[in-house]
Each structure stands twice: as structure tokens, then as C-alpha cells.
Image (spheres, grey):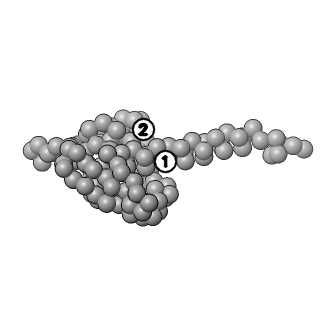
Amino acid sequence: MIYISSRYILYLDVSKDDIAKVDISEMRKIMSKPLTQPMYYILLSLREERHGYEIMQYVEWLTNGHVKIGPGTLYSLLSRFEENKYIHMVSQDNNKKTYLLTEIGKEVLNNEIKRLEHLLNDAKRSVDDEFQNRN
């Protein structure tokens, strides 16, 4: 659950009885930056609960092997995402931590999807552009 004031976002993680206060200006800076390819695919995979190895397998499957995320990259990004409240740990069994997107993480992912859609639309328009094809 998210509560927004004029300066802060209060993020309440009911599953952990945790409340985080996030400065809106900091959040805007973070959310305005494009995600790297590994960041995008990790967040995309965490729309469902998954542990680290499942994330790596899912990304490789989803991209037909074009994107492979190594453990070093994965676990450093998971830590950063947890700090930024994009994801939260839902369970930990036998050294397997399972993660899921938070509301903030969903918003970050949706913003990135919109950004990528704009890029793709621009590319399509460029191919059919009369300006380029005039003689």
C-alpha cells in the first residue's frame, strides 16, 4: 500500500509490517532513468514470486537465450531493488529467497514498458516516414 504526501511516499509492506518513507524527488530521479537490460528482465520476471535461479531460468527462456543474467549481476541488482523498495522478499527456505514486485516496482516496470513502446513506435514511424522517402 502506498500513501503519498506532498514530499514523501510512505510505502507500507503489510507482509513484513514494514513502513518505508521515500522522498518523492529521489523517487522521480530513480524512476526517470532508463533501466538496463538485466534490470528490466529481472523486474519483468518478478511479476510472479521467484527465487534467484528461477529468475535466471525465466529470463533465458523468455528471451530464447539472447539474455543470460549471471549470479553476480542478479544478486547485486536484487539487493539494490530491495533497498529501493522495488521488490520485497516473500519467503526464505533453505537459503532460497523468493522475491516479488512491490507497487513501486510495478510502477517502475510500467514506466519502462511505456518508454520502450515509445521507442518502438518511433522506429516504426521512421521506417514509413515520408520525409526520408521523398525524392
* Amino acid type, label 2: Thr
Relative vertical location of residue 32 with respect to residue 120 in this rendering, above or below:
below
Q: Nearer the viewer, residue 103 or 125?
A: 103
Pointer 1 local density, CA inside 10 Å: few below 14, some 14–19, many at least 20 = some
* Callout 2: SS: loop
Q: Position of residue 108 (x, y in %)?
A: 43, 49
Count of all numbered marks drawn on residues in the image: 2
Query: Which marked residue is nearer to the observer: mark 2 or mark 1?
Result: 1
Contact? badges 2 and 1 (CB < 8 Å) = no
Residue at the front extreme, as displayed: 5
Q: Position of residue 101 (x, y in %)?
A: 32, 44
Along the polypeptide, which appears first: circle 2 or circle 1? 2
Q: Is residue 23 visible?
A: yes
**If the image is split into quadrants, where does the C terminus sit?**
top right
What's the residue at 36%, 35% (across, down)? 61
Residue at the left extreme, as displayed: 94
**If the image is split into quadrants, where does the N terminus sit?**
top left
* Callout 1: SS: helix
Estimate the spatial distance between the alpha carbons at disc 2 and disc 1, rounded to whole Å.
17 Å
What's the residue at 40%, 57% (across, down)? 5
Relative vertical location of residue 100 with respect to residue 8 in this rendering, above or below:
above
Q: Nearer the viewer, residue 102 or 78?
A: 102
What's the residue at 46%, 56% (across, down)? 31
Q: Position of residue 115 (x, y in %)?
A: 55, 47
The label shown at residue 112 is 1
Q: Position of residue 77 (x, y in %)?
A: 32, 56
Q: Nearer the viewer, residue 28 or 94?
A: 28
Q: Is residue 30 visible?
A: no
The label shown at residue 63 is 2
What's the residue at 25%, 40% (across, down)? 50
